[in-house]
């Protein structure tokens, strides 16, 4: 179990360091999408997460209406190991892009990604919502740097 947690820590550290390769330049509008693959969150919790996501976009002056443009996504996955809940949360932006290869290709690409993993034995929902806020704050900071 310790090896798994240490391996996950190093993997996540690598992913967080790679965050600088992403761009949020000229992002103006974003659709909201939440994927809940965790039994720890209910519909009411997901609605609260969506509200936090919309609020974060609006605080940056971004629009959240419609389905054109980028998609701001949050994904929740969890497992329980010996009474400890382990939750993996990903925040990403996917956008329509055109590649700069020989033949330009219209495609859908991840243009931003942030991840967080937490272990919780008590108050797991509080910990999850703190993680959600952390990821949204990181997103906001990155957006401000890029724009």
Image (tube, helix red, strand yellow):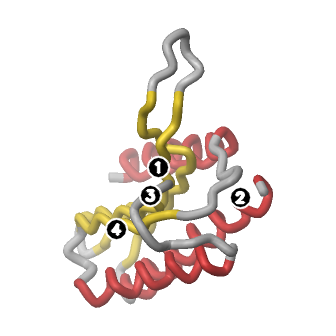
Q: Is disc 4 placed on a helix, strand or loop?
A: strand
Which mark is in front, 2 or 1?
A: 1
Residue 131 at what x, y percent from top left? 51, 73
- Which of pointers 4 and 2 lies earlier in the amino acid sequence? 4
* Location of mark 3 (residue): 68
Mark 2 vs mark 1, CA separation in Å:
15 Å
Split into 4 quadrants, where in the image is the C terminus?
bottom right
Task: Please tell me whether residue 12 is drawn above or below residue 32 in the rendered image.
Answer: above
Mark 3 vs mark 4, CA separation in Å:
17 Å
Decide if residue 81 is in sight here: no
Mark 4 vs mark 2, CA separation in Å:
20 Å
* Location of mark 2 (residue): 142
Tag 3–tag 4 contact (CB < 8 Å): no
Mark 3 vs mark 2, CA separation in Å:
22 Å
* Residue 124: quadrant of the picture: bottom left
In the image shown, does 134 or 119 lie closer to the viewer? 134
* Location of mark 1 (residue): 94
Picture residue at 60% right of the left edge, 49% below the top: 16
* Location of mark 4 (residue): 34
């Amino acid at each position: 179990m310790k090896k798994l947690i240490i391996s996950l820590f190093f993997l996540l550290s690598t992913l967080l360091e790679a965050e600088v390769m992403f761009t949020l330049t000229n992002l103006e509008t974003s659709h909201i999408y939440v994927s809940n693959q965790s039994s720890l969150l209910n519909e009411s919790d997901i609605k609260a997460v969506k509200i936090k996501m919309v609020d974060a976009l609006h605080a940056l002056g971004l629009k959240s209406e419609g389905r054109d443009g980028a998609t701001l996504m949050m994904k929740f996955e969890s497992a329980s190991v010996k009474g400890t809940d382990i939750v993996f949360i990903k925040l990403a932006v996917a956008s329509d892009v055109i590649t700069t290869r020989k033949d330009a290709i219209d495609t859908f690409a991840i243009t931003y990604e942030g991840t967080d993993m937490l272990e919780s034995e008590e108050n797991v929902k509080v910990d999850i919502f703190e993680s959600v806020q952390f990821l949204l704050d990181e997103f906001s900071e990155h957006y401000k740097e890029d724009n």
